[in-house]
Every structure is written in C-alpha cells, then in structure tokens.
C-alpha cells in the first residue's frame, strides 16, 4: 500500500488562496478506495448464475453457430447457452482486466519483451488482485508460460448446493474464460 499525502485544511485557520500552492496533480489525485475481499468473492460466485438467469429471461430467437463439441437435441441448446454465457463472461473480463492493467501501467514505459509482460503479471498484477505474488513460473522457452498459485483465492471456496459435480462444471465454465495468450 502506498501512502498518499494527507491534505487537511481547517476553514478557520487557512484561506482559500493557500490552496494555490498545492500542485494540480495532488488536487486531481483521488483517494484510494478499497473493496472488501469477501465481497469480491461473493460477487464472483454470483456472476455466472446471474448471467444464466438474465439470458433465460431475454431469450430471443437469433442466428448463431453451435459449438463444435455440442451434441444434438437438448444438449445442443444447453451447450449453446453455456457458450453464450462463457462469451459474455470473457467480454466482461476482457473489459475489466484491460482497464485495470491500464491503470497499473500508467506510470511505466511500454513493454518491449514478452518476459516483461510476464513479470508484470506475476508481480504487480497478481499482487494487486490477490495480495500476493505467483508461487511459481515455468516456461518451455518457446513462448509458453505456466503460472502456478497454490492458494488461488477465487476457486479455493468454490462449492454448489447441487454438489460436487455441479461445482466442477461451474469451475470448468470459469476456467475456460481464463487465457494466457501473450
């Protein structure tokens, strides 16, 4: 956590003209806002269910392609629905992740090497999201990187009222939206 200078001016002791001495960057810099980690866990747990329910409400006939791994009949409709949810989750994740990474990189120079990007993800991005660095980073020196986190907070408490099979299915749905295409 970085400490920011505190500006406290009592109205009786200082005049408004004393504010001119402060830099515009100090005045424009908004205070840090923190989000409770438990709240984020609850939010992420409910995202998939909310998208599933909202897509059921807004079911409109539309032209779409069926997944390559889909089967015929009812299973094809379920696969198409899960594919639509997965696509929507990926779009949300891409938008939020891009904005978040842009904020973290605003004071950095451009990344010139793939390794610089990987270091940024392992150290800065991971620490900003999960309060810790990656446990292990492996590579085959051909452009494939494997990040290992033995206590990944997002899935440590994954469960479902329907049991282990449903929790596993939801985990697969969530893990398919996580990519490391660099």
Image (tube, grey):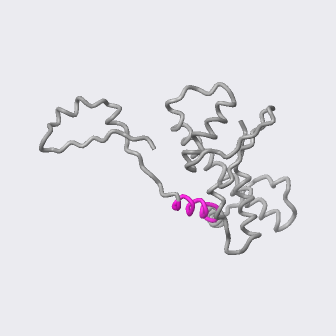
Residue 143 magenta-highlighted: no
Q: What secondary structure do most residues of the magenta stretch adopt?
A: helix
Q: Is residue 150 above or below residue 38?
A: above
Q: Give x and y (percent) for residue 66.
A: 81, 55
**From the image, which quarter does the N terminus lie in?**
top left
Q: Position of residue 64 (x, y in %)?
A: 76, 53
Q: Residue at x 68, y 61 (%)?
A: 60
Splitting the image into 4 quarters, where does residue 136 fall? top right
Region of the chain picked out in magenta, as a range: 38-50
Given residues 44 and 78, the one toward you in this image is: 44
- 35 vs 53, left or right, is left
- The structure residue drawn at horizontal position 87% and vertical position 63%, both measured from the top left corner, is 72
Q: Quadrant location of the C terminus?
A: top right
Residue 13, quarter of the rendered image: top left
Between 91 and 118, the one nearer to me in the picture = 118
Q: Extreme right residue here?
A: 72
Residue 16 picture location, percent across and down: 17, 36
Determine which quarter of the picture holds residue 163.
Answer: bottom right
As drawn, the residue found furthest toward the bottom would be: 162
Q: Residue 177: where, in percent of width, then height? A: 70, 51
How many numbered discs sit on the rendered protein?
0
Examine the rendered structure and indicate whether residue 99 appears above or below residue 40. Answer: above
């Amino acid at each position: 956590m970085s400490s920011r200078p505190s500006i406290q001016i009592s109205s009786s002791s200082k005049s408004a003209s004393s504010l001119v001495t402060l830099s515009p960057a100090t005045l424009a810099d908004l205070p840090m806002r923190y989000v409770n980690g438990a709240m984020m866990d609850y939010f992420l747990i409910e995202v998939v269910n909310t998208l599933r329910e909202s897509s059921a409400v807004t079911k409109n006939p539309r032209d779409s392609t069926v997944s390559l791994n889909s089967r015929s009949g009812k299973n094809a409709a379920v696969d198409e629905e899960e594919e639509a949810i997965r696509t929507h989750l990926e779009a949300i994740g891409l938008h939020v992740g891009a904005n978040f990474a842009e904020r973290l990189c605003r004071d950095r120079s451009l990344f010139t090497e793939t390794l610089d990007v990987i270091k940024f993800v392992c150290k800065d991005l991971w620490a900003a999201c999960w309060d810790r660095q990656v446990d292990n980073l492996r590579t085959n020196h051909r452009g494939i990187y494997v990040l290992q986190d033995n206590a990944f907070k997002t899935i440590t408490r994954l469960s479902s009222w329907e049991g282990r099979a449903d929790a596993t299915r939801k985990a697969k749905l969530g893990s398919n939206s996580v990519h490391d295409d660099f």
